[in-house]
Amino acid sequence: MSELIHQCMTKGVIAEGDQLQHGPNWLLARRGKLKLYQDRLECGNWRIEYRDVKKATLYAVRQYVIVIPIPGYVLKVETEDQTYYFGLNASKYWKKELPFPVERQKGRLRFSLFSVVVRLIFLGYIVYLLWWMFFYFTQRH
């Protein structure tokens, strides 16, 4: 049995193509603990042996909440069969040497069309609520 080295909360997806973007895959992402052992990664019932990893890339990213940049990481793990993406907090652990070979890059989170549409609908709803509250309270006096 391999020793647990590190664990942290994550959002994970199995997906094709570039997932360094806000989009529907991340809305439905698996949420849980990413566990790093001496010989494997685990997240729920996903088990990725390091010997099966073709390539691992750790992207340093910034996610913006309104205008406040929040640092984090996206770990992309490619195996013969699937590509896994894990969204990670900006823990100091990820700056250290990892138990598997990893390429480090700066990444940029983009907005998918889906994400832009959802944000515009949300913004429109907030503007409508503010407009409704303004007229409701000004008409009562």
Image (cartoon, grey):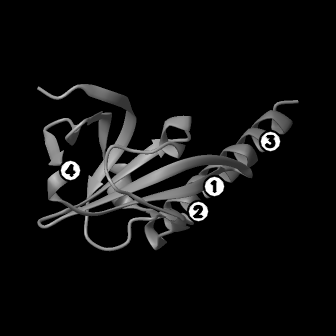
Residue beneath label 1, please?
A: 123
Residue beneath label 3, please?
A: 134
Q: Which is more N-terminal, label 2 or label 4?
A: 4
Looking at the image, residue 56 sits to the left or right of residue 43; the answer is: right
* Numbered disc total: 4
Q: Secondary structure at mark 2?
A: helix
Residue beneath label 4, please?
A: 50
Picture quarter with the N terminus: top left
Q: Amino acid at mark 1?
A: Leu
Which residue is pictured at 80% across the width and 34% down the height? 137
Q: CA distance from mark 3 to mark 1?
A: 17 Å
Q: Nearer the viewer, mark 4 or mark 3?
A: 4
Q: Amino acid at mark 4?
A: Tyr
Q: Which is more N-terminal, label 3 or label 4?
A: 4
Q: Secondary structure at mark 1?
A: helix
Looking at the image, residue 103 sits to the left or right of residue 90; the answer is: left
Picture quarter with the C terminus: top right
Q: Residues within 10 Å of mark 3 (few under 14, many from 20)?
A: few
Residue beneath label 2, please?
A: 120
Q: Which is more N-terminal, label 3 or label 2?
A: 2
Are the residues flagged by discs 4 and 2 in contact, CB closer than 8 Å?
no
Q: Which is more N-terminal, label 1 or label 3?
A: 1
Place of residue 101 in the rendered image (x, y in percent of width and height, measured from the top left): 34, 56
Are the residues flagged by discs 1 and 2 in contact, CB closer than 8 Å?
yes
Place of residue 113 in the rendered image (x, y in percent of width and height, measured from the top left): 47, 73
> Considering depth in this image, is 8 or 122 the residue closer to the camera?
8
